[in-house]
Image: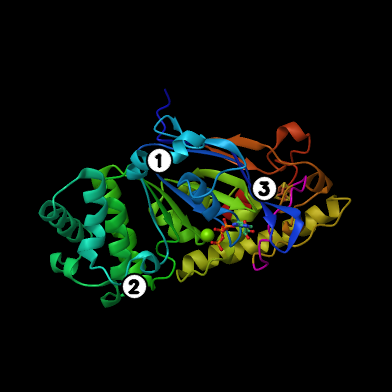
Amino acid sequence: MSEELLSVDHLQMRFKNPHNRAQTVHAVDDVSFTVAPGEILGVVGESGSGKSTIGRCILGLEKPSDGSIHFGGRDLTKHSLLRNRRDIAKQLQVVFQDPYSSLNPFRTIGQTLAEPLQAALRLSDKQADARARDMLETVGLPRAAADRFPGQFSGGQRQRIGIARALIMQPQLVVLDEAVSALDLSTQAQILNLLAQLAKERGLAYIFIAHDLDVVRYISHRTLVLYRGRIMEQGPAGDVHSAPLHPYTAALNAAAPVTDPVEQRKRRTARAAAATAATAAAAASATPPSPASPAAPATPATGQLGCPFAARCAFAQEVCRTKRPADTPVGERTVACHMYDATSGHTRLGAGMPAAELIAS
Ligand SMILES: Nc1ncnc2c1ncn2[C@@H]1O[C@H](COP(=O)(O)OP(=O)(O)OP(=O)(O)O)[C@@H](O)[C@H]1O
Ligand code: SF4
Ligand SMILES: [Mg+2]
């Protein structure tokens, strides 16, 4: 039996494009990863890259087009289990960006938190109320918050309530989908610290979804970088952040605003080196590359053959437009880029200038 808590294998999620029913959107395209008990996996990528769709498939809110999702050894994608998910649901919880929209404005926070305890564990009103107040205290709110209504709380406090609601059933895995994205920086830091502390104390695993590589790096053990439904690279969070292997990760990293002047200088150097390398790559390539443009929106994939990042990549060559890069192991990491893909016969390590060298310089 696997030691992993969660194992996602070759997950595919295809939708009909709502604007053109003849077209299929590959929201998630052959995505595989695992999460160990107590592990925090950051999932990062720009809007439309498929982050929430992966989360929704894990939570059973979408039925995947293909692939499997095993949680605690059980296949969540089986029909019978989907109908019978209540016991699994206790161990698998979610916190969204805005918990307010899913809180009943006419019920007190205490009632909302007590409800699942009463339904699933058959606790008495008094026992459930006591557990709800304990949980509020755990997330840094006063016990008396149980008597108030959702509209009486600030954004940060509401996110604490969202966390309390997710944790009250003592889950093993929590999907946090942009859970801190709407908060101001200081509240964001407080909530991130709270989440990290709770994970450590309770041995919780998280799938932490965000746009921002810095935020993901702060809380995660490992990071998975998504672009147009595909994994570009994954590996230890510190390594992915400080020395990206994939040009898309490097572009995401270079685009993130930073206040630290040392880090700013490092990124300026990396950008200058990338521009020089792009010119060299263009000269070496039969097909001139398009410049990487992190500002351009990620459009949904429609089953294209090559690398989804090819149109924006400064290093793209002909093979990038025709052949899908394999997930190539690089130490503890994997990267899907022909610069690292020995099987394609187009490995440019040594001959070219891989992103890791650029960013490390
Ligand atoms: N129900 C649906 N029907 C059609 N297309 C969908 C559906 N749900 C998601 N998509 C498409 O799938 C792609 C991935 O969407 P998803 O919401 O997972 O992205 P995301 O990375 O979470 O983006 P964001 O950062 O904006 O939340 C997008 O192109 C989206 O338009
Ligand atoms: S496979 Fe090609 S286009 Fe894709 S990231 Fe690597 S070099 Fe760029
Ligand atoms: Mg989303």
Could you tell me the amino acid type at mark 3?
A: Pro
Name the secondary structure under disc 2: helix
Q: Nearer the viewer, residue 276 or 183?
A: 183
Query: What residue do we see at 68% from left, 39% from top?
Result: 340
Disc 1, disc 2: CB below 8 Å?
no
x and y percentages locating residue 261 in the rendered image:
47, 70
Name the secondary structure under disc 3: loop
Query: What residue do we see at 56% from left, 52% from top?
Result: 360
State how far apart marks 3 and 1 are (Cα).
45 Å
Could you tell me the amino acid type at mark 2?
A: Gly
Q: Please say whether residue 304 is one of the residues in the magenta stretch.
A: yes
Which mark, residue 155? 2
Does label 2 point to a residue whose CB lies under 8 Å from ligand 1? no
Q: Main secondary structure of the magenta part?
A: loop
Q: Which residue is mark 3?
A: 354
Q: Nearer the viewer, residue 235 or 263?
A: 235
Q: Which residue is mark 1?
A: 85
Farthest residue, direction right:
286
The residues colored magenta run 295-306
Is residue 354 among the parts visible in the rendering? yes
